[in-house]
Amino acid sequence: MSAEIIDGKKIARTIEREVAKEVESFRADTGVTPHLTVVLVGDDPASHVYVNRKGQACERVGITEKTIVLPASTTEDELLALIDQLNAAAAVNGILVQMPLPRQISSTRVIEALDYRKDVDGFHPTNVGQAVVGAPLFEPCTPSGIVEMMLRARCEPAGKHAVILGRSNVVGKPLMNMLVQKTPRGNATVTVCHTATPDFSVYTRDADIVIAAAGSPEVVTGEMLKPGCAVIDVGVNRVADESAPKGYRIVGDVHFESASQVASAISPVPGGVGPMTIAMLVRNTIRAANLQHSRSGV
Amino acid sequence: MSAEIIDGKKIARTIEREVAKEVESFRADTGVTPHLTVVLVGDDPASHVYVNRKGQACERVGITEKTIVLPASTTEDELLALIDQLNAAAAVNGILVQMPLPRQISSTRVIEALDYRKDVDGFHPTNVGQAVVGAPLFEPCTPSGIVEMMLRARCEPAGKHAVILGRSNVVGKPLMNMLVQKTPRGNATVTVCHTATPDFSVYTRDADIVIAAAGSPEVVTGEMLKPGCAVIDVGVNRVADESAPKGYRIVGDVHFESASQVASAISPVPGGVGPMTIAMLVRNTIRAANLQHSRSGV
């Protein structure tokens, strides 16, 4: 058996076209162009790459985006003062603070300082809590991208056993809370494995859907999977590769070659979850704009 | 094999003694007696019984408690106005609105109106979210009582497979979020089963710990359990029984007779989770008082 490759990039582009239409209709109704402000502290190269991609996606859908770059020496108070300004600015519909932040700044305090109605990353405690009780406002972009990808690739979670590897605040925990909800987007029996799980393959062997967000290169191999399952690979790991131009290549948490022989569907790295995450960000931004203008929409 | 019976009542009394000491030390430091206000709308007999028990526990630990009883015809606006007053009252450290509320009142809106720093039930979205990200302020009383009971009965969840039956906002979902955390109180591999799970016995048979919060009488039987597991029964179900004085008896979600032959430890109904829930409420109330007086404590 050779698995169907779930084309995250293609699905993301479809969603972006939907968002672009919604942005157009928002502009026609309100005379206002939705706007996202991204705050980037320091000069981490990977962060700059991610922020660039987010800006490009905004451009594709007609959302204006501004990136404010602050020096790595920025203090927490300086950043909090900026967030206060952005919270108060009516023209700013969404605020995204790119993580990680330099050591002297508490990311917890920064996230809590955001107006949760502008928190398009969905990390504010109020947004986290709303998602748990089944009344989400903004869901974090990576887990909501995963769910959206599963639905559009016809790997519906409802009634299935979904096994999540990893319990981060960015992926594992919010995804567990989404998949367990009594909605057509959820309704899965959910198991969460992590570093304190003695042997996660006991669980993946029984899973209809495996979502690998463990942060370890190629730890999920074909023999740990149930034939016909779906595999979503959230990992982005650098491994040394002398034959590659940069001296390394990017692999997921799943050993693609062996897994794709056993699964019926699998998302690749790159081109799987990554583009979905960015599509969810622009969707959250138009949702924020709708919310602030008391307008229903996507 | 015959299981050890986990004596929830005894453990709860131990915790109440710890809380009583803390209350004493709080009074000595601040000159103030911690106070809980309970709001009860309507005349549901079960709610009146629960509220009575909560008041008695407050009395045992030295917390003053006042129950405000409102008529069943109370409007949402009237209740929200009362909550505003209680939020503003410095002498009120904790506020508990007894559920369920009459139909004309949205429990969601009422919970969101509470000052989350006085929300000793732990249901405010901010408190729900804080518990998910691993920085809890107040955890809901039933799931925190379950975890506390497991720890004190030496059924530590760390490294075990915990299977939760039920995904309510009151028990299943908050418990899943507590057990999955990277702390000595959590660190379990967690599976959540619910009404969309085709056959939950597939999961309970593999579980080291089963927490039954399904709301169905005696649905977990001995043959669904792994020998030596621990069983926590959260169910409170009335079943008709002509031989009982009231014409019914109370049973849990677990079939006690068969389960206690297979498990190594089991919590009974009544006398298991129930008293723990109330002990957690008084502990949350002294925590609220400490928080509001910028005092560290239990």
Image (spheres, coloured by chain):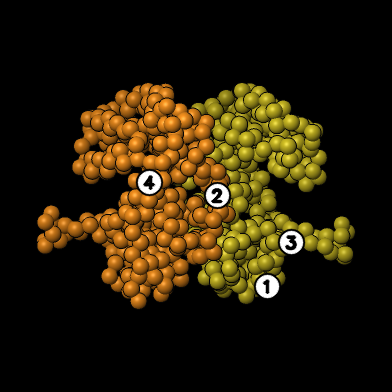
Chain colours: A orange, B yellow
* Residue A30 placement (x, y as % from top left): 45, 28
- Answer left or right for A57 relative to A150: left
> Which of the 4 quarters of the picture holds residue A226?
bottom left
Whether label 3 touches label 1, CB < 8 Å: no
Q: Amino acid at mark 1?
A: Ser
Residue A267: quarter of image: bottom left
* Side of B270 where A258 appears, left or right: left
Tag shown at residue B174: 2
Viewer-side label of 2, 4: 4
Q: Callout 2: residue from which chain?
A: B
Q: Identify the amino acid type marked 3.
A: Val
Q: Could you tell me which residue is drawn at 62 percent across and 75 percent down? A: B223
For the residues marked 2 and 4, what is the alpha-carbon distance in whole angstroms?
37 Å
Q: Dots 2 and 3: beta carbons under 8 Å? A: no
Q: Amino acid at mark 2?
A: Pro
Which part of the image, by quadrant, shows the N terminus of chain B? bottom right
Q: Nearer the viewer, residue A269 or A55?
A: A55
Disc 3 versus disc 1: distance between alpha carbons?
14 Å
In terms of secondary structure, where does tag 2 sit?
Answer: helix
Disc assigned to residue B258: 1
Which quadrant of the structure image shows residue B139? top right
Q: Which mark is residue B251?
A: 3
Which residue is painted at 41% across and 27% down in the image? Answer: A32
Q: Nearer the viewer, residue A57 or B279?
A: A57
Q: Is residue A153 above or below residue B1?
A: above
Place of residue B133 in the rendered image (x, y in percent of width and height, measured from the top left)? 45, 44
Q: Dot 4, how many residues are within 10 Å of its Cα: few (below 14), some (14-19), or many (20+)?
A: some
Amino acid type at circle 4 is: Arg
* Mark 4 chain: A
Residue located at (59% from left, 69% from top) = B199
